[in-house]
Amino acid sequence: MVEPVVLLLNGRGHRIIRARDAGIEAEDDQTLVEYALARDLVVVTFDKDLRDSALRGRCRCLHIRPPERTARQRLADAHAVIVHCFLAQACELATLASDGCVQV
């Protein structure tokens, strides 16, 4: 995950566990999904394959579309909408588009 995104989420009170911090960065996508499910985490990714694995595994996922250089600002602007999607609407997938719109 891009460091500015990590810092933003952490600064807003979200618990962040990077795959490398958990010692599973070299594992396949299914292992990452199982790890997230076991800990009731939302997978945050820029990767379409990981997004697809999360959906197949019924794991909540925030998929951030490129460009990565604008991801932090787009996430900051859409934070409340994204949190609402996962908490109030029980969405499994929210996609943050390159134009900043949130697609569920």
Image (cartoon, grey):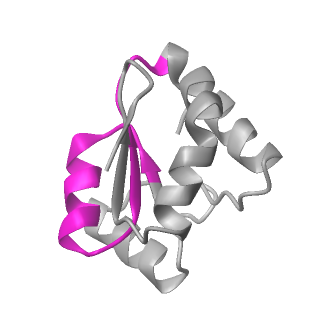
Q: Nearer the viewer, residue 22 or 38?
A: 38
Can you tell which quarter of the image residue 54 is in?
bottom left
Residue at position x 64%, y 58% from top?
21
Can you tell which quarter of the image residue 45 is in?
top left
Expressed as whole percent of the image width and height from the top left, the position of residue 69 reads 52, 14
Q: How many marks?
A: 0
Expressed as whole percent of the image width and height from the top left, the position of residue 7 reads 74, 38
Residue 79 to residue 21: above or below: above
Residue 69 visible here: yes
Residue 24 visible here: no
Looking at the image, the residue that sits furthest to the bottom is 38
Expressed as whole percent of the image width and height from the top left, the position of residue 1 reads 52, 39
Residue 45 to residue 65: above or below: below
Expressed as whole percent of the image width and height from the top left, the position of residue 61 reads 39, 58
Q: On the rendered structure, is 46 left or right of 75?
A: left
Residue 103 is covered by the magenta coloring: no
Q: On the rendered structure, is 84 left or right of 9?
A: left
Residue at position x 55%, y 64% from top?
23
Task: Magenta stretch: give its range.
Answer: 44-68
Residue at position x 67%, y 28% from top?
4
Q: Nearer the viewer, residue 17 or 57?
A: 57
Q: On the rendered structure, is 82 left or right of 4?
A: left
Q: On the rendered structure, is 53 left or right of 24?
A: left
Residue at position x 54%, y 46% from top?
81
Residue 59 is covered by the magenta coloring: yes
